[in-house]
Image (cartoon, rainbow, N blue to C red):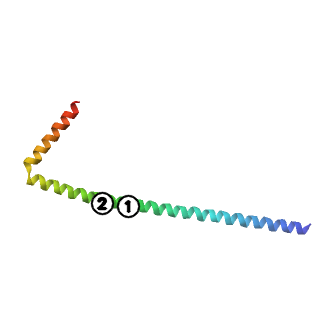
Amino acid sequence: MSDIESQLQKLSSDIAALTKTIAGAGTETADGYRAKVGALAHDAVEASQNAMAGARKDFMALEGDVVTRIRERPLQALGIAVGVGFLLAFAARR
């Protein structure tokens, strides 16, 4: 009878150790996922900031080109602006 009790106690301690091992593995897995998600979020933020910086740089260059062309040909720019205004007014009436 004592042999059965000792085996039951050993089995109980083995189950407790197994439970702790499984819980530890789950915690490690969750921590790993958190780290991966954090790294992905950081990468996404960095890529977004780089894209915004590139778009800002392109916009500034485009703005400089438009200003230069308007200064070179002010009458042509005025004609284009008037034409676009008439088209928008015509479209707004319908």
Q: Which residue is mark 2?
A: 53
| Distance CA(mark 2)–CA(mark 1) | 10 Å
Picture quadrant where residue 88 is located:
top left
- Determine the residue positioned at 85% across, 68% down: 6
Is 24 left, or right, of 88 in this rendering? right
Q: Position of residue 28 (x, y in %)?
A: 59, 65
Q: Nearer the viewer, residue 78 or 34?
A: 78
Q: Which residue is mark 1?
A: 47
Amino acid type, callout 2? Ala
Q: Which corner quadrant holds the N terminus?
A: bottom right
Please determine whether, in this image, residue 78 is positioned above or below residue 30: above
What SS does tag 1 mark? helix
Q: Position of residue 44 (x, y in %)?
A: 41, 59
Q: Position of residue 73 (x, y in %)?
A: 8, 51
Residue with the most extreme top position: 94
Picture quadrant where residue 22 is located:
bottom right
